[in-house]
Image (spheres, helix red, strand yellow):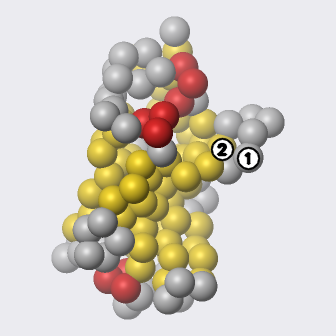
């Protein structure tokens, strides 16, 4: 069992930066693929970035070069540094954990709003 709690969302102007944090509870953290997803109104939830326990990282094309995902297994934390934010990045951002390749866990989400 993994419980996830996000923080760090908010309102920022276009071009600005935000850092999202997710703290995980449960002994499965180090075995998990951790990721960030987002969902804008009227859109499906989409992958933003994910990182395996071995440090292999995948980014959505739309955020490459602007967002950076990282994890700290000693603190059970995963982060998403978001730079050069665009209005199109506005969404609810969710922390995600995939354990054993089959068990999916989600955080409650944190709102990111980018104004023009």
> Residue 39 — which label?
2
**Residue 21, quarter of picture:** bottom left
> Residue 75 — which label?
none
Query: Image point 33% across, 59% down: which residue?
Result: 57
**Residue 113, quarter of picture:** top right
Give the Cα separation between the discs numbered 2 and 1. 6 Å
Q: Is residue 66 left or right of residue 116?
A: left
Near mark 2 (Cα within 10 A), the count class, few <14, some 14-19 or many ≥20, is some
Of badges 2 and 1, the one in the foreground is: 1
Residue 99 position, x and y percent, is 49, 84
Residue 25 position, x and y percent, is 41, 79
Query: Image point 50% across, 60% down: which residue?
Result: 95
**Residue 35, quarter of picture:** bottom left
From where the camera sits, is residue 113 visible?
Answer: no
Near mark 1 (Cα within 10 A), the count class, few <14, some 14-19 or many ≥20, is few
Say whether disc 2 or disc 1 marks the residue closer to the N-terminus. Answer: 2
Examine the rendered structure and indicate whether residue 57 appears above or below residue 65: below
From where the camera sits, is residue 95 visible?
Answer: yes
Examine the rendered structure and indicate whether residue 65 appears above or below residue 47: above
Query: Image point 27% across, 57% down: which residue?
Result: 70
**Mark 1, secondary structure of its residue:** loop
Q: Are marks 2 and 1 in contact (CB under 8 Å)?
A: yes
Residue 42 position, x and y percent, is 80, 36
Residue 63 position, x and y percent, is 43, 36
Count numbered badges in the picture. 2
**Mark 2, secondary structure of its residue:** strand
Q: Which residue is mark 1?
A: 44
Query: Image point 60% across, 76% down: which residue?
Result: 104
Q: Residue furthest left?
A: 74
Q: Residue furthest top?
A: 116
């Amino acid at each position: 069992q993994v419980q996830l709690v996000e923080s760090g969302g908010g309102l920022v102007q276009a071009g600005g930066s935000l850092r999202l944090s997710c703290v995980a509870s449960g002994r499965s953290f180090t075995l998990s693929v951790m990721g960030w997803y987002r969902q804008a109104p009227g859109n499906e939830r989409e992958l933003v970035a994910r990182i395996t326990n071995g440090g292999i990282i995948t980014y959505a094309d739309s955020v490459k070069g602007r967002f950076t995902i990282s994890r700290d297994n000693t603190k059970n934390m995963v982060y998403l540094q978001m730079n050069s934010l665009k209005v199109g990045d506005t969404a609810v951002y969710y922390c995600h954990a995939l354990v054993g390749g089959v068990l999916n866990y989600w955080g409650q989400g944190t709102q990111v709003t980018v104004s023009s």
